[in-house]
Image (cartoon, helix red, strand yellow):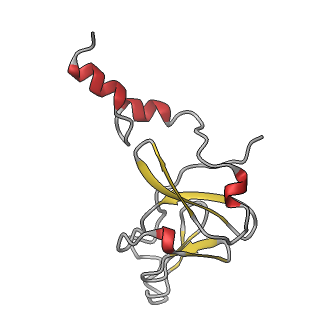
Amino acid sequence: MLKREDNERLVRVGPGTPMGVLLRRYWQPVLLSWELKERDGAPVRVCILGEELVAFRATDGRIGLVDAYCRHRRAPLFYGRNEEQGLRCVYHGWKFNVDGQCVDLPNVGGETYASEPTSGSSHTLPSRKAG
C-alpha cells in the first residue's frame, strides 16, 4: 500500500507537480478537428491536466490553445472575439495570436506598447492536427 505522500505525488497533475511535469512531455489529445471547424469561429473551453484553456481556429486555419483568462484583468477569453488571426478579449480588447503573443493593445498608447510588461505571451500549449 502506498503512503499518503507517494499517492499524492502520483495523482496530482497540475502545473509544477511531478506527474504534471511528466505528462506534459507527451502529446495529449484534447479536441477533435470537427469541434473547431470554422475559421474565426467560436472558441471552445478545454480543461486538461488541471489547466483551464481555450482553443480556437485562426483565420489561416491554425489552431491555438491558450490560457482561459486574459493576462490583463483575468477576463475569460472564452467570451472573446475570434477575429483576424487572433482571439480578442472582450474586456479591454487585447488580442492574442495562436502562439499566445499579445499582438494588439488598443488601450495602450503607441510608444508604451513595446515597454508594456504584460504585452508578452500568454500561457500556451503547442497544438497540431493529427490523423
The quarter of the rendered structure image containing the N terminus is top left
Query: Left or right of 12: which side holds 22?
Result: right
Q: Residue at x 47, y 77 (%)?
A: 114
Query: Left or right of 63: which side holds 105?
Result: left
Question: Residue 5 at x, y = what percent?
Answer: 22, 22
The quarter of the rendered structure image containing the C terminus is top right
Nearest the eye: 118 or 9 = 9
- Residue at the top extreme of this rendering: 1
Does 90 appear above or below 38?
A: below
Where, by quadrant of the figure, is residue 74 drawn?
Answer: bottom left
- Residue at the left extreme of this rendering: 4
Query: Left or right of 3: which side holds 92?
Result: right
Question: Residue 58 at x, y = what percent?
Answer: 68, 67
Question: Residue 3 at x, y = what percent?
Answer: 22, 15
- Residue at the front extreme of this rendering: 35
Q: Residue at x 35, y 25 (%)?
A: 10
Q: How many marks?
A: 0
Does 33 appear above or below 80?
A: above
Q: Residue at x 63, y 49 (%)?
A: 31
Query: Left or right of 34: which side holds 30?
Result: left
Q: Residue at x 75, y 67 (%)?
A: 60
Nearest the eye: 115 or 74 = 74
Question: Residue 16 at x, y = what percent?
Answer: 35, 39
